[in-house]
Image (cartoon, rainbow, N blue to C red):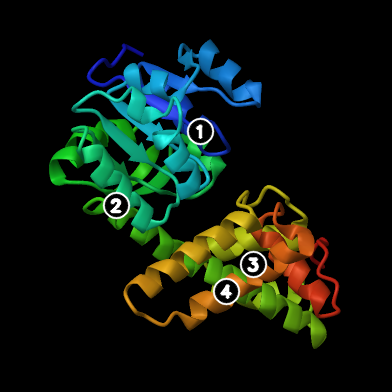
Amino acid sequence: MTANTSEQIGFIGLGLMGHGMAKNIVEKGYPLTFLGRKNRAPAEDMVARGATEASSPAEVAARSTVVFICVTGSRQVEEIIRGTGGLKAGLKPGSVVVDCSTADPVSTMALATELAELDVAYVDAPLSRTPKEAWEGTLDTMVGASDQLFARLKPVLDTWAGRVVHIGGTGDGHRMKLLNNFVSLGYAALYAEALALAQKVGISPARFDSVIRNGRMDCGFYQTFMRWTLEGDRDAHKFSIANALKDMTYLEAMAESVGMANPLGNAAKNSFAGASAAGKADQFVPMLATHIGSVNGVDLSPSKPT
């Protein structure tokens, strides 16, 4: 594709989501500089596609007008921006940092204020969907930015997102993402407990599914979640229990910051906290069902439906 030189793009975080996003940015014609990882396969793939590897966040910043960050959460984002050799050492006035992580809105607003002193804009554009959609360029993103910044960034966002929603100003993207994850992870905790109780009273996952699927309680997330228990698909939803706990902890902090009780959020958080404490932090969210079953004396190990 003909090179698009309207923006010089930087990218930090070639993980499960970031690799596909960066791949699509390059494929759509934008010049891209990225920071490599210990896992060399994504970096080598990006170089083969024409991207340039940098040795530090500062170098990424110096070569870019827009820098995307796609890492685990706020602590990692803060280190990338503020740390030795971080983005702040290389950012030019007029450039934009776009945080695609699921982050703490309090941290987001502090970073936005800090970067504004350098005449650098800070935008939050957290993600929804899975690595499959990242690779296909059909992710959802909810964007916190001014109207002017959103218009500037929209063509770049369109390279990797199929659904781009301008939710409000800086910080609102991360606030909405926590609300989105509250709903999805709340569903996950509910499904896991319902499956365990069903098994406890003699109703198998397959029989449970035969009622919920295609009924009013069905949804895309339910179908993804159930692929582990029904089919043993480890990659059905590649989002870790540790990350789920992090996001629900951020939600708790957001609720506390406005003086709101959040009992259902805390209940869902505790489901993931229990699984994490039991050594399941690196497992994926649908595997919560197996853990909840185990602590209640029932076996929800994956099996083919009968």
Q: Quadrant of residue 232?
A: bottom right
12 in relation to 282, above or below:
above
Q: Say whether marks 4 and 3 touch (CB < 8 Å).
A: yes
Amino acid, disc 3: Phe
Most foreground residue, 186 or 245: 245
Marks 4 and 3 sit apart, C-alpha to C-alpha, by 7 Å
Disc on the earlier residue, 2 or 3: 2
* Residue that protrudes farthest toward the front in the picture: 84
Task: Give left or right: position of 220 versus 144.
Answer: right
Q: Residues within 10 Å of mark 3 (few under 14, many from 20)?
A: many
Residue at point 42%, 29% (across, down): 86
Q: Say whether marks 1 and 4 touch (CB < 8 Å).
A: no
- Residue 140 is situated, as x and y percent measured from the top left of the image, at 40, 48
190 in relation to 303, above or below:
below
Q: Secondary structure at mark 3?
A: helix
Marks 1 and 3 sit apart, C-alpha to C-alpha, by 25 Å
Q: Secondary structure at mark 1?
A: loop
Disc on the earlier residue, 2 or 4: 2
Which label belongs to residue 13? 1
- Residue 292 is situated, as x and y percent measured from the top left of the image, at 74, 73
List the residue tagged with mark 4. 268
List the residue tagged with mark 3. 272
Marks 2 and 4 sit apart, C-alpha to C-alpha, by 26 Å
